[in-house]
Amino acid sequence: MMRILPIVICAGLALGPAQAQFAAGQLTQTETLEVPGPSQHLFSNPWYQCTRNFYVNSSTGNDANSGVSPVAAWQHIQHPDNPSRTGGDCIHVAPGTYSENIRIEHGGNAPTATGYVVYRCEVMNACHVLSRTTASVWGFRNFGSFVVVDGFEVDGNNALVTDGASDVCFLSSDPAYGAGGSSLKAGASAHHLWILNNIIHHCNLAGVGFQNKEWYYVVHNTVYHNAFQSGYQGSGIGLVVVQCIEQGGTNCYTSGIVGTPTSFYSYVPSGNDNAFNPPAAWSPFHNVVAWNVAYNNRINYKNPIGCGSLVHTDGNGIIIDTFLDGFSNTLTFPYQTLVMNNVSYYNGGRGLHVFRASNVTVANNSVYNNLTDTCILRTGTKGFVGDFSQVGGSNNVWINNLSKPVPNLGSACALLAGNGPGVPNINETYTDNVLNSDMRNTTLSCIFDNDASVPYFSCSNNKCSTDPSFVDATPGVNATTVGGAPTGGTWIPGHANFALSPSSPAIGYVSPRSFLPAQNVDAGACHHSLTVCPNPGTTNY
């Protein structure tokens, strides 16, 4: 069972009937287990605390108000972002539609329960933030670190531009906001960002795109229909070119551009950075992508990149991408990242892709029916691709994962593992994964380079050619030809219930680790007692 946290109620935050049920301890069996997707339990029992409370209401608010009570609410979410913000400030947003693009430049001051600035919808997923422009919907820059965004629907606006006007739904990036001039010079992207319990969709490059700093937490979100049309290579959730900020740390920044806080290159970890107490603290992991649902993220066949040479490289559900400095590409991010208990299905690219990144633990994830983009660039010794993909990196650990590919391209592996461009696989570990394909036969070379020759991978430590036996998972609509439209012109997923059938070989098949939740007694993201998994929070695609 998941750890039941003490209830933390911010002053002035009223509980609705469902929240009161949680407060009274009346939890059903399903609600006491963590399930991928937005979590009402986590939302109703936040790990953060509010020391000051402010209010926003799109219908009754006015930015000339004080914001200190619901009757004196501001109108726009952007308005509270000013130099008076400090750790412990909670911005309570009333249900409604907010047509705005938000830039957070004033955050909190510490990785503690009262150290963050929190933007919180009063009813989970009832605050619809709808983009008005082609810019990112919600960005973080300069002093916009130590920020939590909890319980919103963030929408790139398919009505304004087909497949989304905004490029990225949640963005922090040196290239976007101001980059340093060397491998060791920090730019303007922010750090210590939490994206919790959100529904994130229709951004044309990425749902979540965090780059160039660290301490990123993407937890219990649903991310769908992103990356379709930007003309670049994007994915649903992407941590890309992550670089460390610790004072004196190996390969970390040593200076910053004019105007950036000194913490961007001389940060001293404290508080929750050094503790392990999920969901608030995850040490030794500096980045966490956990309990998310990622589906129908893809580079569309009509994307400006084109398709003539199979040149789509991404459109993944989740990607951990190039954890090297963004200049020389020789400085490796030295700290650990956790990718855990996610469900990723029906994406154009891979379900979960670790590319030229090191010190990543991939645990208890479930992937199915990805690689539906027939334009995807194929990798490996025979031109194959994998629903799970480990291409380049050192000291990565793959444990307790489930993969059932659908051979959309005739060359889909449950797991593809081998060297990446300029980055060999070194000291990788693969244990207790259930993989529904033959990993080593002569016609399907899913394991190659160091992973095969050392070997790091062995079917004796995993279950190869084994169906994980989901309760109700059926393939979605595929492209009809290379670069062609699917039948009907619309990408439609199939059934997506990844709960385990009673006879599933994943039940009880697990490599235990101290950092995994106690409920992780099976391989994959869904506990064997669940009859429906995940909780996607939306039926759209």
Image (cartoon, helix red, strand yellow):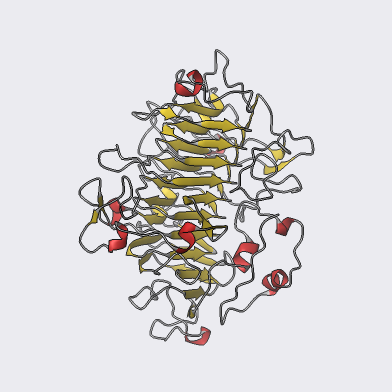
Residue 245 at what x, y percent from top left?
A: 33, 54
Q: Is residue 491 visible?
A: no
Query: Does residue 78 lie above or below 339 as drawn?
Result: below
Q: Residue at x 61, y 55 (%)?
A: 538
Residue 426 at what x, y percent from top left?
A: 43, 29
Q: Is residue 329 visible?
A: yes
In this view, the residue in front, 145 or 15, is 145
Residue 253 at what x, y percent from top left?
A: 28, 51
Image-based side of 482 in relation to 345, left or right: left
Q: Quadrant of residue 278?
A: bottom right
- Quarter of the image containing the N terminus? bottom right
Query: Does residue 366 lie above or below 156 as drawn?
Result: above
In this view, the residue in front, 413 or 106, is 106
Q: Residue pushed farthest right?
A: 502
Count of labels shown?
0
Image-based side of 217 in relation to 528, left or right: left
Q: Quadrant of residue 132?
A: bottom left
In this view, the residue in front, 296 or 514, is 514
In this view, the residue in front, 85 or 135, is 85
Query: Does residue 238 lie above or below 33 as drawn?
Result: above
Image-based side of 430 in relation to 383, left or right: right
Residue 301 at what x, y percent from top left?
A: 44, 36
